[in-house]
Image (tube, grey):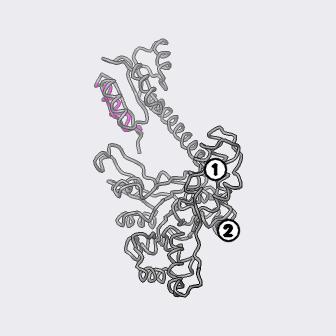
């Protein structure tokens, strides 16, 4: 797509010359005849470079340049003037101009200056992206854990090293699905390319389609500029679709076609564009159940689930809880500049006993709070949230010797099934695996027990 240039000159003839000449050199031109109108459109839209005359009615080009540098430092400004004195050049550089061109000039000379300015902007944008990506990797941490429950996960990740296949990552909310996706990206041939993530549940259907596939200028209301979709932004790298189970059915059809053809059609465009992107996806829903209910396409499921990585809930990971807590503690203590070195044994026991319905995300929240409240070099029980301090793990037991207090085998089974379901926060797929049942058998039992389906999770 062409770069966007904003041209400001109160001489309409000069603006017309640039508006006719620059498009043939790869630039889409917007012209304005005053600094005020130009600044307003620059604050509302995105441009790759600004070209401004110095002497204009009202605010001059040097003052406009200073305003742009103060408010849009990411956009380079090229100053043009017929009065090519040393003093004017120095004033332009002091105002923050990227470069200075004197009249008369030819369009080839101006193009060279604009090309250098745009390349500089692209480089700055890439540096910022890389800094953000490094910070994100540092914040998300590595995939920590050596418990038996994590063994199959580590084994799969090792076997998928350098692989290009699509991977579906499942597990309860907060178990670290995006951490796994980033680990897969870093261990692949695409590690030098971008990692782009989108939450499919966070956007309405029309906006999600535009985010994924892009759109052309004027494709819909407020589409004032063309936009590159995430499939193309992730070219050479990885696209991660989080909460893919929430994607609306009409959009599932378009996603399936894109994956089959390896091409996307931006909204409002006539032609398709090829992409080279690996797809990873994640969900906390049971997609098999969603297929049975008609809420998810089976053909798309097979495209996404070439390899399936299931993350265990934190409560099933044993001492990994303490490993993760210590990792979070080191990070939050450093950020808070507090000399906290560890967790007291009694506090550790409380952490291990708690069921962690919010999984790793809840644990991180707990540790961050504890660091903020801690008064000593160790996290103590008093630093933990009250629900964790007072938590008392319950068990399913057969008690009593009075025949009238004893219950049938079916009732014991009912209580145990419901207890397991409670322990996994209503996740029926996880409960079926713990109980050693297939999903349909579990569903029939729940119907017989009168279990409210609205309380369950897929």
Work out whether 77 lies above or below 390: above
Query: How far across and down, in percent of the image, does residue 8 sit?
Result: 35, 26
Q: Can residue 286 be seen in this view?
A: yes
Q: Is residue 218 magenta?
A: no
Query: Which of marks 2 and 1 precedes in the sequence?
Result: 2
Q: Is residue 28 magenta?
A: yes
The kind of secondary structure the magenta stretch mainly shows is: helix
Please state the extent of the stretch shown in magenta in the rendering.
Answer: 12-32
Local SS, label 2: helix
- The mark found on residue 328 in the picture is 1
Query: How far across and down, in percent of the image, does residue 33 sit?
Result: 30, 25
Taking depth in this image into account, of 205 and 353 the one nearest to the observer is 353
Residue in view at x 59 percent, y 60 percent: 180
The quarter in which the N terminus is drawn is top left
Taking depth in this image into account, of 144 and 325 the one nearest to the observer is 325
- Decide if residue 218 is on the left or right side of residue 106: left
Q: How far apart are marks 1 and 2 (CA)?
A: 22 Å
What residue does disc 2 label? Answer: 151
Query: How far across and down, in percent of the image, does residue 140 sit?
Result: 59, 51
Local SS, label 1: helix
Work out whether 4 lies above or below 361: above
Taking depth in this image into account, of 273 and 447 the one nearest to the observer is 447
Mark 1 touches mark 2? (CB < 8 Å): no
Q: Is residue 103 visible?
A: no
Q: Dividing the picture into quarters, in which one does residue 212 lie? A: bottom left
Label 2 neighbourhood size at 10 Å, few (<14), some (14-19), many (20+)?
A: few
Residue in view at x 60 percent, y 56 percent: 389
């Amino acid at each position: 797509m062409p770069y966007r240039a904003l041209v400001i000159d109160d001489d309409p003839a000069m603006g017309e010359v640039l508006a006719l000449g620059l498009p043939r050199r790869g630039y889409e031109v917007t012209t304005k005849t005053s600094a005020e109108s130009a600044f307003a459109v620059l604050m509302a839209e995105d441009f790759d470079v600004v070209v401004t005359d110095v002497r204009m009615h009202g605010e001059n080009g040097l003052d406009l340049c200073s305003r742009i540098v103060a408010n849009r430092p990411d956009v380079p400004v090229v100053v043009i003037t017929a009065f090519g004195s040393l003093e004017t050049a120095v004033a332009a550089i002091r105002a923050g101009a990227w470069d200075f061109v004197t009249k008369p000039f030819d369009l080839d000379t101006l193009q060279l200056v604009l090309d250098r300015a745009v390349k500089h902007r692209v480089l700055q944008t890439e540096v910022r992206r890389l800094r953000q990506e490094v910070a994100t990797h540092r914040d998300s941490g590595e995939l920590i854990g050596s418990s038996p429950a994590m063994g199959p996960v580590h084994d799969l990740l090792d076997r998928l090293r350098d692989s290009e296949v699509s991977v579906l990552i499942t597990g309860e909310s907060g178990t670290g699905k995006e951490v796994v996706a980033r680990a897969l990206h870093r261990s692949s041939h695409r590690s030098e390319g971008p990692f782009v993530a989108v939450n499919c549940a966070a956007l309405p259907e029309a906006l999600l389609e535009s985010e994924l596939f892009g759109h052309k200028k004027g494709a819909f209301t407020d589409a004032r500029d063309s936009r590159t979709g995430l499939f193309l932004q992730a070219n050479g790298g990885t696209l991660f679709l989080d909460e893919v189970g929430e994607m609306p059915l009409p959009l599932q059809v378009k996603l399936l076609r894109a994956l089959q053809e390896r091409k996307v059609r931006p909204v409002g465009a006539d032609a398709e564009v090829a992409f080279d992107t690996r797809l990873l996806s994640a969900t906390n829903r049971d997609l098999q159940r969603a297929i049975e209910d008609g809420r998810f396409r089976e053909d798309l499921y097979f495209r996404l689930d070439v390899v399936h990585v299931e993350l265990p809930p934190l409560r099933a990971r044993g001492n990994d809880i303490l490993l993760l807590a210590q990792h979070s503690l080191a990070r939050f203590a450093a950020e808070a500049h507090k000399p906290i070195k560890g967790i007291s044994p009694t506090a550790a026991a409380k952490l291990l006993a708690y069921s962690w319905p919010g999984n790793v995300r809840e644990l991180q929240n707990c540790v961050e709070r504890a660091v903020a409240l801690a008064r000593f070099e160790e996290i103590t029980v008093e630093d933990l949230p009250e629900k964790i301090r007072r938590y008392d793990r319950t068990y399913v037991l057969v008690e009593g010797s009075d025949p009238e207090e004893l219950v049938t085998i079916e009732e014991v089974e009912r209580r145990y099934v419901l207890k397991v379901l409670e322990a996994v926060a209503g996740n029926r797929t996880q409960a079926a695996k713990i109980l050693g049942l297939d999903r349909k058998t579990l569903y029939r039992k729940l119907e017989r027990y009168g279990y409210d389906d609205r309380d369950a999770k897929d």
